[in-house]
Image (tube, helix red, strand yellow):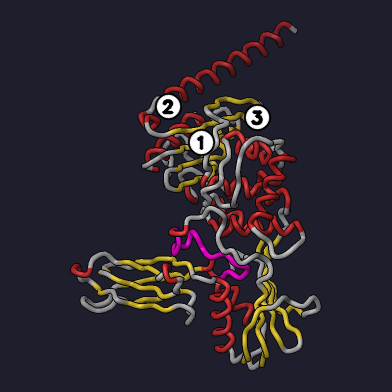
Amino acid sequence: MRTITTAIVILLTHLAAQAQEIASAMDSLLRDDLFKSSDVSVVIYDLDDDKSIYSHRADKMCRPASVLKLLTSVVALERLGIEHTINTTLCSKDGNLYLRGETDPLFSEADLDAMVASIPAGTTIDTLFADCTFTDSIYWGPGWSWDDTPWEYQPYISPLMLNGGCVDVCVRPSAKGTPPTVTCTPQSAYYTIVNEATSHDATKGKLTIMRDWLDNSNTIRIRGNCTATTGERMNMFRSDEHFIATLMEKLTARDVKVGTTARNQTPCDADTLYTCRRPITAAIKEALEESNNLCAEALIFHLGALYGHRPITHKDGVNIVKAFLEYNLKINGEYEIADGSGLSLYTYISANTMMQALKHAYNNKLIYSTIEQHLPLSGWTGTLKGRMAGTAAERKIRAKTGTVSGICTLAGYAQARNGHTLAFVIFNQGIMKSKLARRWQNKVCELMCR
C-alpha cells in the first residue's frame, strides 16, 4: 500500500511540475511586446486529466471571428444530427415546375446540370416557380459590414444558392496591347462582363476585377494591365435570381420550353423530379477547414428550422445556439451571438465559453470524431496549411482559425508529448498586424505540444 501511495505522490508531483512549467512559459510569452498595444484571452485544458492547465483573462468578452464556426458546427451536430441533409428539390404539378431551396451552400453547376437532366428534352412547362419560402428576405446577418461586398466571403444569402452565390472570373493575358481573355463560371446572361483591361501594358496600372456593387449591379468590370492569369470570385446581387436565370438558360439549351417564371410555395402533393441532398458534414467540413462563411450560415438556418415555421430568420438559428449554451453547457453569463460565421460586429463570447463547447464535443464521441476530422491540421490542411510546419506542433494541432480586422483567434485541440489531448482557446484582440498574432499563437501551440 505504501508503494502505491508513494507512486501516486510522485505522479501528482510530476503533473504539478509540468503544469507549473507551462504556466511559467505562458507568463513569459505574455510579456511579448505584442501586448503593449493589444490584448489576449487564453485557456488551456487537459481533457484526459480533466484539469485546467492555464487561464488568462478567460472571462473577458471577445470577438471570436471565424472560431465561432466551431461552436456553430458543434451545435448543428448536437441538434440536427450527423444524418441531416440540406436539400434542393425540383417538383412538378399541373404542367408547372417548382424549385424549392434550403440554402445549400455547396450547390454546384454540376448539380444544376443533373437537375436539368431530370426533365425530358422537348418538354413544355407553363411556369417555373421559385420556392424561396425557407428563409426571410434579409440576405446578410446582423452586424455584417456593408462594404465587405462584393467579395465571395460575404454572399447574398437566399434559399437558392448556385456556386455559393458567386461567379468565378478568370482573366488570362493575350498578345501585347490586346484585351485579355475572360472566362466565367457558371456562364449566364444574368451578369455582364465589361473587359476594359489590356495585356502587357504597364501604363494601364494594376489589374482589378470588380462588380458595380454600390449600384447593386451585376456588371463586372475588368481594368488595368494583365500580365498573368488572375482569378477572382465575385458575389452576385440577388443570388436566387442568379440561380433561376442560369437554370432557365440550361433548360432552353435542353429544348425545354418555359412560359414564364414566378414565385410560389411548392404544393404538398407535387411530384418530386429531382433532389440534391447535401450531407450536413459536407457543410461542416467547408466551414471548419476552409472557413466558408456561407456554410456556417446555412447551418444556422437549418438550426432555426427546428422551430417548425417559415420563413426562418437568423434570430431563429441563433436562439437555438443560445439555448444550447444555456441548457447543455450551463452558461448563463454575458455573451452575444448574432450569426453563425463570426462576421458579425455584434458577436461577443469569452474564451471560457468556447472552452466549454470544446469539452462538450470531446465528451461526445460522434461529435468529436466529425469535428476532429474536419478541423485544419497544422502544417498540412485548410487554413493551418502554412502554419507550424517544421516545429514541434506540426500535425499536432487541430484547430479553427479566425481573422477579421483587429481580431485574430485560434481554438481547437492539441496533442501533447505525453499523449494527452489538450483543448485550447486563444483570442487575440486589438491586433493591427495579424501575422504577429499568428506567430505568437504558433509559439503557444509549440509549447503545448512540447
Residue topped by disc 2: 29
Residue topped by disc 3: 48
Residue positioned 55% across, 16% down in the render: 17
Q: Position of residue 191 (x, y in %)?
A: 45, 77
Kindly report which numbered mark, 3 or 2, lies closer to the viewer in this rendering: 2
> Please, which residue is most extreme toward the right here?
269
Query: Image height check: is 158 above or below 411?
Result: below
- What amino acid type should be assigned to the residue bearing mark 1? Ile
- Residue 119 versus residue 323: which sits nearer the camera? 323
Quadrant including the N terminus: top right
- State the CA–CA distance, disc 3 to disc 2: 25 Å
- Which badge, 1 or 3, is on the more N-terminal residue? 3
- State the CA–CA distance, disc 2 to disc 1: 13 Å
Q: Which mark is residue 95?
A: none
Residue topped by disc 1: 426
Q: Is residue 176 left or right of residue 279?
A: left
Dot 1, how many residues are within 10 Å of its Cα: few (below 14), some (14-19), or many (20+)? many
Magenta residue span: 148-162
Helix, strand or loop under label 2: helix
Residue positioned 73% across, 50% down in the render: 79
Q: Is residue 378 visible?
A: yes
Residue positioned 69% across, 83% down in the render: 97
Q: Is residue 276 visible?
A: no
- State the CA–CA distance, disc 1 to disc 3: 20 Å
Q: Position of residue 236 (x, y in %)?
A: 49, 70
Kindly report which numbered mark, 1 or 3, lies closer to the viewer in this rendering: 1
Q: Position of residue 237 (x, y in %)?
A: 50, 70
Q: Position of residue 132 (x, y in %)?
A: 65, 72
- Residue 429 versus residue 294: which sits nearer the camera? 429
- What amino acid type should be assigned to the residue bearing mark 3? Asp
- Which badge, 3 or 2, is on the more N-terminal residue? 2
